[in-house]
């Protein structure tokens, strides 16, 4: 029988994205090494801010067409001081997320042994969340425009609108409930700001109530985003699945990963749940220009993303083995600078590989 081959598109892009994708590939190669019955066929794409300097675009014009046939995309981070951030983000990451209808962005917040949280009450039995981010519309719909740039008397104006559709709200909220059912704590917290955003977010709240009625076994709450940010800090043990709009969930998941110890730890998956298009797996963090190129960035967020990719590819045993290896490495004290250690990216990578289950 021939081994199953998974075709993976690697897009390291910018800054530490390159370092963590290289580290993640090394770990995935070790997992696929001999006798597993599967292998990865990688193709790496040079897209990102350097590509922009040369070609005037962040990715090849036919990039989506090229990516369409891959089993998954393994992404680093995009953004560099040479390109305006809205150009780089819209030209690559958002182009892929929206082009492939990756409408569910799943961002677990994991508390790892040996890593200190800034929360005094943190311990791994209490804190275990997944932030479910609406990833196709909301505040990132790109609706709006600018006008009056040339009118000296008035000053320029800009309008940026958020888009909330019933279909878009329902599919992400339903995803959150289905996910909650698989977890020890069956609870979904919905986050909006519907006292101020009286159209789109009231629609979200109403869809949430309607869908919740179909899941009587799952506890629910609706919380305003400002109160939820306080809750993350003060009552972290009360949360399980947190579902929110594109912007709010983006902000809350950075807060969550900082509470877990570092932005460098947080994994994420941009899923097209219908599997009509490839899904994309990437750490939550950005390109970290302040530490890029030094070999000291934390690769654990990229490793966690690789574990989510293994789950998606139908390799749950391998995903679990990788998660256990990450925990074993942090428990041994092999930590990068951002989490209080002195290890390099390479040393953390080697420690995780050494802790992979024997075959
Ligand atoms: P950032 O996430 O790159 O960095 C924020 C802070 O976290 C920095 O102090 C950085 O050193 C630290 N950090 C991030 N990743 C780390 C890692 N793996 N190990 C250790 N420390 C880490 O966010 P920032 O500075 O706001 O953005 C930098 C660039 O990244 C911008 O161009 C931004 O647009 C882009 N960006 C891209 C994202 C993506 O591709 N998904 C997400 C967020 C930002
Ligand atoms: Mg973010």
Image: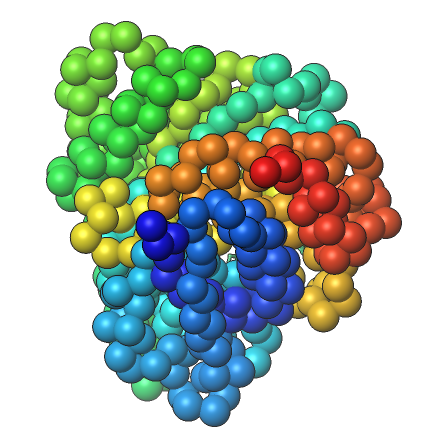
* Horizontal side, residue 282 vs residue 188: left or right: right
Q: Nearer the viewer, residue 110 or 71?
A: 71
* Horizontal side, residue 152 vs residue 303: left or right: left
Task: Quadrant for residue 230, please give it.
Answer: top right
> 99 above or below 33?
below
Percent x, y of residue 40: 44, 58
Task: Quadrant for residue 115, please give it.
Answer: top right
Going 69% across and 67% down the picture, which residue do you hit?
A: 292
> 53 above or below 126?
below
Percent x, y of residue 33: 56, 52
Extreme residue in the top direction: 217
Percent x, y of residue 214: 17, 15
Going 46% across and 84% down the picture, which residue do you hit?
A: 52
Extreme residue in the right direction: 342
Q: Nearer the viewer, residue 45 or 121?
A: 45
Q: How many marks?
A: 0
Tell me, yes or no, if residue 157 can be seen here: yes
> 135 above or below 62?
above
Extreme residue in the front direction: 1
Q: Nearer the viewer, residue 236 or 264?
A: 264
Going 73% across and 56% down the picture, which residue do you hit?
A: 345
Going 40% across and 61% down the picture, which residue do you hit?
A: 8
- Judging from the image, the colouring scheme is rainbow
Tell me, yes or no, if residue 154 can be seen here: no
Percent x, y of residue 343: 82, 50
State which quarter of the image contains the C terminus: top right
* Horizontal side, residue 80 vs residue 52: left or right: right
């Amino acid at each position: 029988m021939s081994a199953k081959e998974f075709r993976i598109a690697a897009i390291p892009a910018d800054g530490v994205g390159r370092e963590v994708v290289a580290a993640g590939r090394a770990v995935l190669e070790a997992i696929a090494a001999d006798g597993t019955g599967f292998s990865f066929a990688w193709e790496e794409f040079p897209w990102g801010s350097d590509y922009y300097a040369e070609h005037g675009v962040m990715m090849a014009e036919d990039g989506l067409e090229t990516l369409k046939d891959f089993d998954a995309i393994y992404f680093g981070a995009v953004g560099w001081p040479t390109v305006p951030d809205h150009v780089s983000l819209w030209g690559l990451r958002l182009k892929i997320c929206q082009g492939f209808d990756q409408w569910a962005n799943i961002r677990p917040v994991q508390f790892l042994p040996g890593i200190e949280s800034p929360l005094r009450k943190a311990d791994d039995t209490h804190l275990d969340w997944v932030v479910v981010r609406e990833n196709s519309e909301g505040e990132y719909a790109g609706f709006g425009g600018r006008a009056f740039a040339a009118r000296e008397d008035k000053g320029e104006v800009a309008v940026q609108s958020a888009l909330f559709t019933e279909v878009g709200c329902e599919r992400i909220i339903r995803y959150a409930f289905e996910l909650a059912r698989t977890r020890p704590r069956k609870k979904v917290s919905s986050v909006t700001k519907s006292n101020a955003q009286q159209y789109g977010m009231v629609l979200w709240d109403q869809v949430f109530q309607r869908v919740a009625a179909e899941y009587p076994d799952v506890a629910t709450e609706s919380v305003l985003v400002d109160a939820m940010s306080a809750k993350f800090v003060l009552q972290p043990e009360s949360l399980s699945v947190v579902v929110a709009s594109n912007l709010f969930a983006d902000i809350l998941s950075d807060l969550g990963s900082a509470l877990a110890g570092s932005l460098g730890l947080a994994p994420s998956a941009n899923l097209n749940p219908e599997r009509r298009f490839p899904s994309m797996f990437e750490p939550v963090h950005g390109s970290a220009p302040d530490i890029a190129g030094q070999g000291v960035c934390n690769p654990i967020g990229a490793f966690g993303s690789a574990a989510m990719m293994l789950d998606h590819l139908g390799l749950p045993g391998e995903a679990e083995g990788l998660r256990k290896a990450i925990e074993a490495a942090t428990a041994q004290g092999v930590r990068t600078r951002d989490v209080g250690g002195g290890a390099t990216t390479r040393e953390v990578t080697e420690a995780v590989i050494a802790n992979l289950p024997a075959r």
